[in-house]
Image: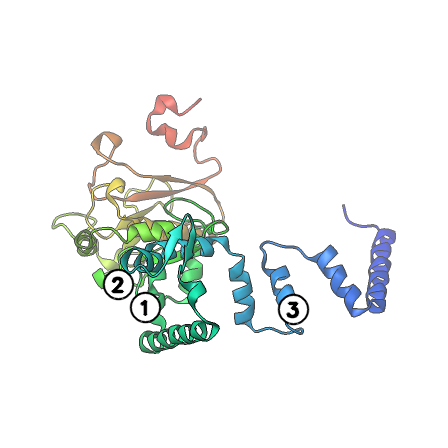
Amino acid sequence: MGLSEGDLMGEIWALIGYKAILLKMTDFQRLKDYIQNKMRMSHIYQPVMLMELFTNNGQASSEQIAKAILQLDKSQVDYYKKITKQMPGTVLTKNHNITTKEKDVYKIESFNSLSDAEVDELVDLCQSKLDEYINKRGERIWQHRTNASGYISGTIRYEVLKRAKYRCELCGISAEDKALEVDHIIPRSLGGEDDLTNFQALCYTCNSMKGNKDDADLRDISKSYKKREEGCLFCEIPKDRFIIENKLAYAIYDGYPVTDKHTLIIPKRHVQNYFDLHQPEINACNQLIQKMKDRIDNEDLSVTGYNIGINNGEDAGQTIFHCHIHLIPRRTGDVDEPKGGVRGVIPSKQQY
């Protein structure tokens, strides 16, 4: 129900009154009111940014604010704790006896024998080594944070994270619990392309474990995308029949449609069934399913639902042994009893 004229006037006067109160507030009262009463948080960012501004004479660069946020990001701290134990901790403690380790604490046992001047000189030497290395290597020193070499645009990062719903695509952990990295499924160095279908969102743990896979295997996978089979209907479909395509898949209208605009989404590689698809191909097919669904919705307002189905194997009804996914638009009244949907592949089991 809409507001009555009296209620609407009441809302207007309340708003005018609130603005009048705001005008009378001191700067402190206005800031306090915002933080206490109006700050709506989906993450830690607002209070951290304001604290950084309050403690730095009212101004701070985006880099300063980013560092303040980083200090509270447990996932990043956990990542570098792991790096510390695996790399400098091992080298300095086990390999060269510079440090010792007791539980989770590292020590320089001889520290108390050093003078302040000696400590300052050693710190300066470390800083000199650090500056020399950074100047020599540049941004490449941070490539251990991702298995993909080179720059990945912010647009691609956003699209990959959005597609993954901000969760690791292997273990499912949320980006709020562990930092996510945008990773090439097949690395560039092994033939992987900068296509959206070849990216995935991984937490740093899954990404580091992925780095242990055999290079030859990945290289073979990269080559396999070019596989086509002579005489296969879907390997030889002319491009002028494509409705849309991407790097790894294409969509065509079914030659024997169940309903109007019945569509097939087909991986370009010759692969017999869905279970043999590589993850980038699954990504590519899902992308085209969504695009075709949007396209059909825009072209035909009578569509009220969809069936999505795959026949895997002769006993499941597969007749062309090149994987293909059916996207079947449905309309009100196109069958008398739609309940059960894909259960109708065994007619006696459709109704329940």
Residue position for label 2: 188
Q: Tell me if label 1 and label 3 are in contact, CB under 8 Å.
A: no
Query: Where's residue 181, x and y in %?
Result: 39, 57
Q: Residue at x 86, y 55 (%)?
A: 10
In the image, which disc is placed on residue 179? none
Is 227 left or right of 187, judged from the image as shown?
left
Instruction: Between label 2 and label 3, give the one nearer the viewer.
Output: 3
Residue 1 against residue 96 in the figure, above or below? above
How would you rate the neighbour count of disc 1 (Cα within 10 Å): few for under 14, some for 14-19, many for 20 or more? few
Of the image marks 2 and 3, the number of the one nearer the N terminus: 3
How would you rate the neighbour count of disc 2 (Cα within 10 Å): few for under 14, some for 14-19, many for 20 or more? some
Is 48 left or right of 242, judged from the image as shown?
right
Query: Which quadrant of the rendered structure holds the C terminus?
Result: top left
Marks 1 and 3, how far apart in space? 37 Å
Q: Residue at x 45, y 71 (%)?
A: 115
Marks 2 and 3, how far apart in space? 44 Å
Residue 284 at least partly seen: no
Three-letter amino acid code at disc 1?
A: Gly
Query: Where's residue 168, x and y in %?
Result: 41, 49
Query: Which quadrant of the rendered structure holds the N terminus?
Result: top right
Is 48 left or right of 259, judged from the image as shown?
right
Of the image marks 1 and 3, the number of the one nearer the N terminus: 3
In the image, which disc is placed on residue 150? 1
Three-letter amino acid code at disc 3?
A: Thr
Three-letter amino acid code at disc 2?
A: Arg
Of 300 and 13, nearer the camera is: 13
How would you rate the neighbour count of disc 3 (Cα within 10 Å): few for under 14, some for 14-19, many for 20 or more? few
Q: Quadrant of residue 239?
A: bottom left
Q: Secondary structure at mark 2?
A: helix
Residue position for label 3: 55
